[in-house]
Amino acid sequence: MAKGPEKNTKNKALHTKLLNRKNAKISQEKKEKAARLKALVTKMNQQKNKDDSNAV
């Protein structure tokens, strides 16, 4: 039986590697953004509590 053309697995593997790298970068940026927001919220809550205790 005749075989079809060879599959281009090298480019597919490279493409998958690049997509995985891109997705990892995006997820890392999301984690960093969430951490920054969490730190900011914590800081604002502490400042709010400090202001409330000074006002009383």
Image (spheres, rainbow, N blue to C red):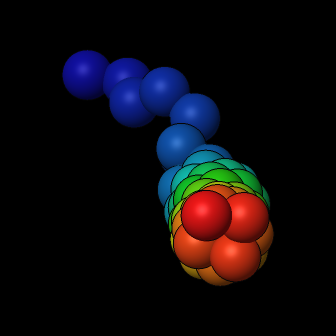
Rendered image quadrant of residue 50: bottom right
Please state the total of marks drawn on the protein image.
0
Q: Residue at x 26, y 22 (%)?
A: 1
Rendered image quadrant of residue 35: bottom right
Residue 47 spot, x, y in % from top left: 72, 74
Residue 9 spot, x, y in % from top left: 54, 56
Rendered image quadrant of residue 26: bottom right
Q: Is residue 42 left or right of residue 43?
A: left
User: Of all residues shown, which one is farthest toward the front?
Assistant: 56
Q: Is residue 4 above or below residue 43?
A: above
Q: Residue at x 37, y 24 (%)?
A: 2
User: Of all residues shown, which one is farthest toward the left?
Assistant: 1
> In the image shown, does 3 or 45 lie closer to the viewer?
45
Residue 15 spot, x, y in % from top left: 69, 55
> In the image shown, does 40 or 54 lie closer to the viewer?
54
Residue 49 spot, x, y in % from top left: 58, 68
Q: Is residue 16 above or below residue 3?
A: below
Q: Residue at x 39, y 30 (%)?
A: 3
| Residue 34 visible to an observer of this rendering | yes
| Residue 17 visible to an observer of this rendering | no
Q: Is residue 25 left or right of residue 10?
A: right
Query: Which quarter of the figure is the C terminus placed in?
Result: bottom right
> In the image shown, does 15 or 29 lie closer to the viewer?
29
> In the image shown, does 5 or 2 lie closer to the viewer?
5
